[in-house]
Image (cartoon, helix red, strand yellow):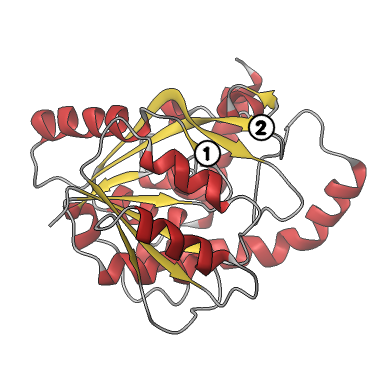
Amino acid sequence: MRTVAILLATYNGEKYIKEQLESLVHQTYQDWHLYVHDDGSQDNTVNIVRDFSTAYPGKITIMDYPPTGGPCKNFLSMVEKVEAAYYMFCDQDDVWLPEKIEKTLHVMRQAEISHGADTPILIHTDLSVVDENKNTINPSFWNYSKIYPQWFKSYIDYAALNPVTGCTMLFNAKAKEIIKRPYDVATMHDAWITFSVAAADGIIIGLEEAMILYRQHGNNTLGAKDANKLTLLYKIRYFLAIIKHKRARFREFNTIQKIPIREYMASKKRYKLFVKNR
């Protein structure tokens, strides 16, 4: 069993995936294995992955099962099928900095010494926001989006505003064990796992260092938003979608652990005040 399982969910990613794969093979920490599941790509994505698998034998497994219908189910399906000591999620269009695995794993192992290896632990990091050509937009996604991971202490806090970005996560096998199942109401894999760890009184640690070039382009599933520069059009579109999104998210975290609506709203208000007063 490999120490670190990197789970890469792909879909029509031929434009950027080669650069992402190259950043993985040049990591300073090499005891990892890459698992790739494609969700029905119509481009050259799978062939590019196969070429890398041939070039780096024993490092890449292409998982052969039907498409799942989106990144959330795709990532969570791989978590179910892969056995490892630690898990990381990988997006097809980013670039990992060379020490991403090594530094995140170091924080994980220190946390396991402090809290015990039987504790569910999740480590996440900051990201450097770049454009499609890797020009820096902002060196800190956390600052860019007004995210302050040190504020989050309880399950209610994480439910009110999840600060964890999936492609920065490293979680241990114990965290996998306590992930809430089934995944029917999960909206995104990172939130679902974060909520599960928080609800189990696990440890969530934010590493205040950008470990990824977080590429922004027209096809991002989510992407980064500058909290200070949201356009009127974006705000209108967001307002129209907010009710549907909030209902889905509220159903999601209440499936894991029920929260009174008043406590949820109070936590969101506390965070807004915290950000305003910084």
Q: What's the residue type where badge 2 is placed?
A: Lys
The quadrant of the image that shows the C terminus is top right
**Residue at (51, 27) in percent of width and height:** 148
**Residue at (18, 31) in percent of width and height:** 111
Is residue 120 something that shows in the picture? Answer: yes
Q: Position of residue 159 (x, y in %)?
A: 47, 50
Is residue 263 something that shows in the picture? Answer: no
Left or right of residue 201, residue 10 in this image: right
The quadrant of the image that shows the N terminus is bottom left
Q: Position of residue 128 (x, y in %)?
A: 57, 28
Marks 1,2: beta carbons within 8 A = yes
Residue 163 vs residue 224, the one in the foreground: 224
Name the outermost residue toward the top. Answer: 278
Left or right of residue 237, residue 157 in this image: left
Residue 169 vs residue 251, the one in the foreground: 169
Left or right of residue 10, residue 153 in this image: left
Residue 251 position (above or below residue 17): below
Q: Which residue is mark 1?
A: 95
Binning the other alpha carbons within 10 Å of mark 1 as few (below 14), some (14 to 19) or many (20 upward) gives many
Residue 50 vs residue 126, the one in the foreground: 50
Q: Position of residue 225 (x, y in %)?
A: 71, 39
Residue 78: image tag: none
Q: What's the residue type where badge 1 is placed?
A: Val
Q: Which residue is mark 2?
A: 134
Q: Position of residue 103 (x, y in %)?
A: 30, 27
